[in-house]
Image (tube, rainbow, N blue to C red):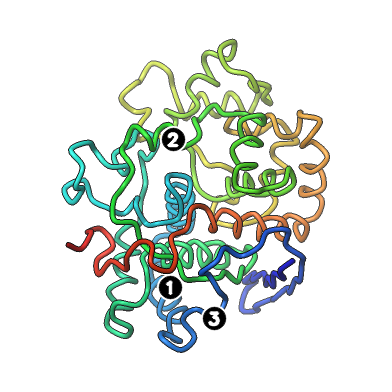
Amino acid sequence: MGRITITSTLTLSFFLIILVYSASANNSIPKGLSYNFYNKTCPQLEDIVRATLAPVFTNDPTSAAALLRLMFHDCQVQGCDASILIDVSNSASLEPPELGAKKNFGIRKRESINQIKSRIEEECPGLVSCADIIVLAAREAVAISGGPRIIVPLGRRDSISASSSEDADASLPAPDFGVDDALSLFAKLGMTTRETVAIMGSHTLGVTHCLNIMDRLYRPSDVRGSNMDPRFEALLKFSCPENIPFSQNISFVLNDPSTFIFDNLYYKNSLQRRGVLRIDAELPLNTRTAGIVEQFAANSDDFFQEFGSAFLKLSYAGVLTGNHGIIRSMCNFVDN
């Protein structure tokens, strides 16, 4: 049994409030990862990541959601190996790599990972993987938005190839996936039901593109989980009109009103039938998850604690360590 130490940071006016947690984790750290992996070889690593991202978060408040999504999509396709960063033009395969998958539409802030990598290469050349940088950037995204500060073990290595776009689309969840799908998907990563409900709380950040909710809005008989507050439904339909198809890729709706803050409002909205996606609507209705949603809506500390554990389990998915994989010199390019 390992120990997770989590601190939550919230900025209120000029005051910084730090909440410290200590919780047991049911997941063991994969062989090759450790909490002090770079202590001797690159002790300034986390400071570099934080300093590089500070202006990114300041200039673009949507960056936190984008970096968190980047990690999720990387780790769910052949593991946390930075394969999502490999450019189409740099793929050794004749097939489009995973970045070109339909479900990777809207993936952003890959350039921020490249910026961090460039800074690290100046200080610690050839030592730090892009896979670790993605995880650290996502961790910072959660913390800077007011969520838990999660201490993550490091030591991941980068893949030498990307998955095909077809395989990536098969691995990533569909916009209309529900509770059964979520529990099955995240159980494969060792997550409990509570952790699965917590990891869905990442929807508290960011937006949802209209394209992903058109069936739910206009063809509810085809998609379960269509139960929705009528006023909220009217708002979504106003933002995502069915008769303007070309706008569905560029138009979006906020996941919740506090879209830049990592909080438990996601669960409160779900209980009020204001969930944007099908999974958001089903969580408070399913007997296996309803009580957990109510608990997280009432107590953000409980949500943060479970989210920290779930985040770690996601970050362990399919990791390459030791002699497996490489350390890329450029994150979007596989070295010869």
Decide which of tag 3 and tag 2 comes sooner along the chain. Answer: 3
Disc on res. 54: 1
Tell me which residue sits at (40%, 33%) in the image.
169
Foreground tag (3 vs 1): 3
Q: Is residue 235 above or below residue 205?
A: above
Up-down relation of residue 128 to residue 93 (above or below): below
Question: Which tag, 2 or 1, sits closer to the chain's start?
Answer: 1
Name the residue located 31 percent from the left edge and 47 percent from the top edge.
162
| Outermost residue to the bottom | 40
What residue lies at 35% left-to-right and 61% top-to-bottom? 325
Q: CA distance from mark 2 to mark 1?
A: 26 Å
SS at circle 2: strand
Residue 20 % position (x, y): 73, 74
Location of the C terminus (image quadrant)? bottom left
Question: Spatial distance from mark 3 to mark 2, Cα to Cα?
Answer: 39 Å
Query: What amino acid type is highlighted by mark number 1?
Result: Ala
Query: Does residue 230 appear left or right of residue 104 in this picture?
Result: right
Using the image as rendered, state which of residue 171 and residue 318 is in the foreground. Answer: 318
> Which residue is at the far top?
221
- Dot 3 falls on a residue whose secondary structure is loop
Give the percent coordinates (x, y) of residue 134. 42, 62
In contact (CB < 8 Å): disc 3 and disc 1: no
Disc number placed over residue 36 in the picture, else none? 3
Left or right: 252 in relation to 244: right
Name the residue beneath numbered marker 2. 209
> Label 2 sits on what residue type?
His
Task: Decide which of tag 3 and tag 1 comes sooner along the chain.
Answer: 3
Residue 313 coordinates in the image, percent (x, y): 61, 56
Instruction: Give, as a three-letter code, the residue at label 3.
Output: Asn
Q: Is residue 67 left or right of residue 180?
A: left
